[in-house]
Image (cartoon, rainbow, N blue to C red):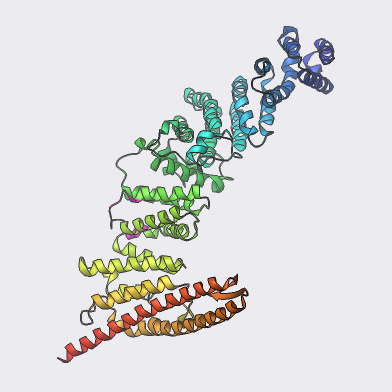
Amino acid sequence: MAVEELHSIITRCQILEEQDFKEEDFGLFQLAGQRCIDEGHIDELLEIIQNEENKVIIKNMGWNLVGPVVRYLLWNDKEHDKRKYYFLMLDLLVKLCNPKELLLGLLELIEEPSGKQISQIILLLLRPLQTVIQKLRNNKAYSVGLALSTLWSQLSLLPVPYSKEQIQADDYGLCQCCKALIEFTKPFVEDVIDNKESSVENEKLKDEILKFCFRSLKCPLLTAQFLEQSDDTGDDPLRCFASEIIGFLSAIGHPFLKIIFNHGRKKTTWDYLEFEEEEDKQLSDSMASLAYLVFVQGISIDQLPMVLSPSYLLQFNMGHIEVLLQRTEESVFSKGLYLLENGLLRIEDNSLLHQYLEIKSFLTVPQGLVKVMTLCPTETLRKKGLAVLQLYINKLDPQGKYTLFRCLLNTSNHSGVEAFIIQNIKNQIDMSLKRTYNKWFTGPQLISLLDLVLFLPEGAETDLLQNSDRIMASLNLLRYLVIKDNENDNQTGLWTELEKIENNFLKPLHTGLNMSKAHYEAEIKNSQEVQKSKDLCSITVGREEIPNMPPEMQLKVLHSALFTFDLIESVLARVEELIEIKTKSTSEENMG
């Protein structure tokens, strides 16, 4: 019945001129063709399509059959014996139909699916889509751009595989699609290369490919994880995709050096590229991704001029590192850690000039490292952040270290980080006293820094438990200064500032310890009473109420807090004892 209906429509249309086809004819042709496919009349349908007398009808109406054919191929078993005939029909329709209508029809089909079907339909339609675009005579650049944009939008919906196992399994087909997308794009890149004349259309095509490359650098390559260098990197599909994308950039006249070194001057470099609307959202991420691929993954690194100094390369990459560290995804900000480490390892210790800290990113990047160290849930990345921050400190010259310490003491708001900085200050003082004199960690400059260390932020009311790491580090630094610097030498300036240190730090710490111990001893007494009644109750630890904790656990927490206070108190007592011994000894020497 369906075949007869289709023959009837075709017979009526054969006597009409092309311009006389009505909308009703298109609709009837589509319905009858759909029914032929549904009922399995594939041989009859192929015969109709291949009939030379139906050439004009198929050219104008045949594209309506592409959707049903594609859906059949997606939904039916791959072993079905009739699949080859549907593939043949698809090839014939691509060959015979109006390419403009086909282009729009294929793109609509690509936009339809979700989940795992996204990759299935892309892999099915990339070659037909490529053929259709190559048949177009006008507005080829626009068609390429439309196709690449549609394909990228769909691919961006697929989850990016994270581990080696996920990459190899490729459950959602992203890796296969990336490989196929490269093959799809190659002929259009070759068109740009072959067209030596700088025509407007060629420039537009170049820009569409450039946009696609930037989008790909952001997704999937920004979040993509790559196999270890020790593994067979040739088998890493995402790395191969990245390599091809960077190769495309070079092929169309935008090698990575030109792109990333001109970042910030893009409007004068890319005259045809309209990135104004999306540059803030996309371009910075794309550039950061490109920098990581080149400098850490080593893709096209051989194109990098050897004359560029390590400090210049670090300066150049700092903006990209800042972008990566601002992201919350571990797969992205971890790339910032590795890109920074890569740049720092090229630089000798103590050689990074303090003037670089006048560049905003040279201070915001270490603050980003602090966020990784304190907020990242993954221990290995927290430790990596700490190691990279220490490496950064090691590379700075003395004034640079001094400036960074002041910055982080003022901005970190984290006791553990402040303790880490204070330990670094102690190390710098030690080197200055033992090896080479350093004005930044002795005398007036050091005293100014110690003002940020040897004090309690809220005086006696400071939460000692929450600030215990910082307080212990400060006391240990003070103990070190008292031991190493004699009052008569006073190289550090400590002894002239001792009264201020006692008033701002030691005395308030005594008072705070007495108040804190009294509070926690009362809490222990209360908890012991509750334990007898076997009820749940809340306790206050570090100004935060912890509700419904079992009494045994309460006691454990409270005794741990008291132990911390006892530890602080013992170090404080030792510091005061050393101060008394030193001042008494100096007085006796002066009297003698």
Q: Residue at x 36, y 84 (%)?
A: 502
Up-down relation of residue 117 to residue 383 (above or below): above
Query: What residue do we see at 41% from left, 48% from top?
Result: 338
Residue at horizontal 33 percent and vertical 39 percent from the top: 305
Count the marks: how many?
0
Would residue 434 be found to the left or right of residue 180 on screen? left
> Can residue 581 be seen?
yes
Indicate yes or no whether the magenta region holds residue 579: no
Q: Position of residue 14 (x, y in %)?
A: 80, 10
Relative to 145, is 54 above or below? above
Looking at the image, residue 63 lies above or below residue 110 = above
Residue furthest bottom as drawn: 591
Q: Nearer the viewer, residue 582 or 68?
A: 582
Q: Is residue 68 left or right of residue 277?
A: right
Q: Quadrant of the C terminus?
A: bottom left
Q: Position of residue 351 (x, y in %)?
A: 28, 56
- Residue 448 in view: no
Towards the viewer: 346 or 592: 592
Q: Position of residue 433 (x, y in %)?
A: 22, 70
The magenta stretch spans residue 354 = yes
Residue sticking out furthest to the top: 52
For the N terminus, give its image quadrant: top right
Residue reaching furthest to the left:
592
Please report the residue visible at 50 percent of the width from the left and 34 percent of the height from the top: 168
Q: Where are the magenta residues, as a range? A: 344-356
Q: Position of residue 88 (x, y in %)?
A: 66, 15
- The majority secondary structure of the magenta stretch comes to loop
Q: Which residue is more in the foreground, 174 or 103? A: 174
92 relative to 182, above or below: above
